[in-house]
Amino acid sequence: MSFPKDFAWGAASASYQIEGGACEDGKGPSIWDAFSHQPGKTFNGHTGDLACDAYHRFEEDLDLMESLGIRHYRFSLSWPRILPEGRGKINAAGLDYYDRLVDGCLQRGIKPWITLYHWDLPLALYHKGGWLNRDTAYAFEEYASIVADHFKDRADSFITINEPQCVVGMGHGNGLHAPGTLLSDEDMFRSWHHILLAHGLAVRKIREIIPCARIGAASTGALAYTEDPCSNTPEDLVCASFLSLPREQNEGWYFNHQWFLDPLVFGHYPEDPAAVWTPYKDSIDPADLSVISQPLDFIGLNIYNGTEMVPSESGGYQIADKYEGYPRTALKWPVTPGVLYWGPRLVYERYKLPVVITENGQSCNDRIFLDGKVHDPDRIDFLARYLGKLKRVCEDGIPVLGYFHWSFTDNFEWYSGYDDRFGLIYIDYRDCSRIPKDSARWYRDLIAENGESLS
Ligand code: FCB
């Protein structure tokens, strides 16, 4: 056995990162439109005003996707393109665009996986308090209901929220992402809780409208892995990954999975006396937790790298030292393939829900070579290593339903602007033309043989 026969090989994108059309056809502004236009917030002042111009060129992207045999496309909808004020009046032209996109997928045999929230909150809602305002969760429910109702005959796979860890941690913790307003720990927790509430309300609504829907959310955070071939029991590593990584008083501790997934799956926040948000969690209405913990069909994991653990003298595990010159991507993220074995496994061991890898990939310093092609051996090597580990976890019986490469095309990489390239398809930003990289052809061949040749 290798990858399951019906394994979903896909690619992913997000509205603000690719669409452009920032002010077209009645779209309202999002917090990312406002943030990227503030001086000093993004690399060289880049904005998503045009991005990859997918708003006009999506057909070309879908044609490329079809030619590569990619049959699953995860994309997000821009909430303010559909509801310019966040709630209330619907922008018909916005829904038209997504009609064309969804229909274009279906005509080419590509299954749409719709993400509802990949960070472009309507600016109008931010002016009313954003995620700090509980009403935003109900606005999200209204938006989810409009989307589900509109696409009920054409889409059944949904991801509610992408990475609340980044929404709160970077949007309000370190300020690197929109809206960039720094909040106290208590208000960060309150915003977090409202995002989880939004998730629960949306899941309930989508299921009411599309009973057969497959719904998940995309989580990110610290994950541990080991190269220790003898380790066959995940318990120590679960412990290491979820409890022992330094986080108290540690900047960025909120990049963990359990403060998101425990409430979603178990219906309560983690029991963790040392955690920064623990003092605030008793103030919330317990009824919220039953809304938040709606049954889910899968857990989406965005996994780029992990923390290597090695056996410690005391019998447990400790964080491995990194050697000089350890492998890194262009963004200087460590290359740690083992996390694509241990990540899904640890998460499955804890939550007992199927896993979908909703994002994985690497940034490279891609460029057009003399022969006019884009050669990206780094990315191919990265994918071969990571996907080999994913194959092993499938062989070990962990239910992994699919893998979405981040990203389909190069795009606006948030505060790094266009400086980082994650795509299988190169975008020449001088004219937005598309050039499939070597990795795109490599991925095409891999999909065709369902990953059989990976080791
Ligand atoms: C993830 C985001 C995605 C992209 C990748 C590189 O955190 O979800 O939009 O920026 O990182």
Image: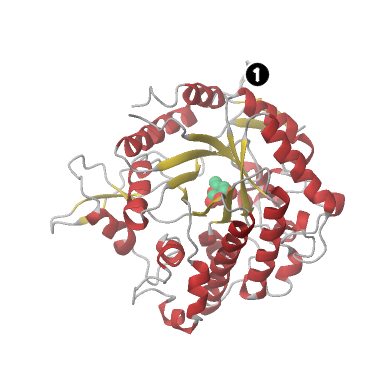
| Residue 59 appears in view | yes
Q: Is 136 above or below relative to 49?
A: below
Question: Quadrant location of residue 35?
Answer: bottom right
Q: Does residue 47 sit above or below 435 in this rendering?
A: below
Query: Percent from the top left, x then y, of residue 415?
Result: 62, 53
Q: Which image quarter is the C terminus in? A: top left
Q: Which residue is depicted at the point 69% across and 50% down?
A: 77
Of 343 and 49, nearer the camera is 343
Q: Amino acid at mark 1?
A: Gly
SS type, badge 1: loop
Left or right, residue 68 beside residue 298? right
Residue 432 vertical placement versus 51 (above, below): above
Compared to residue 243, the image places residue 43 above or below, namely above
Residue identified by numbered label 1: 372
Which sits in the foreground, 174 or 393?
Answer: 393
Callout 1 crowding tier (Cα within 10 Å): few <14, some 14–19, many ≥20: few
**Could you say which is closer to the camera, residue 393 or residue 29?**
393
Q: How is the image coloured?
A: secondary structure
Report the residue that reaches farthest toward the top. 371
Percent across and percent down for residue 360 are 48, 42
Name the residue at 42% across, 61% down: 256
Q: Nearer the viewer, residue 415 or 164?
A: 164
Relative horizontal placement of residue 81, taking residue 375 as reference (left or right): right
Given the current orientation, which residue lies at the most extreme right position? 25
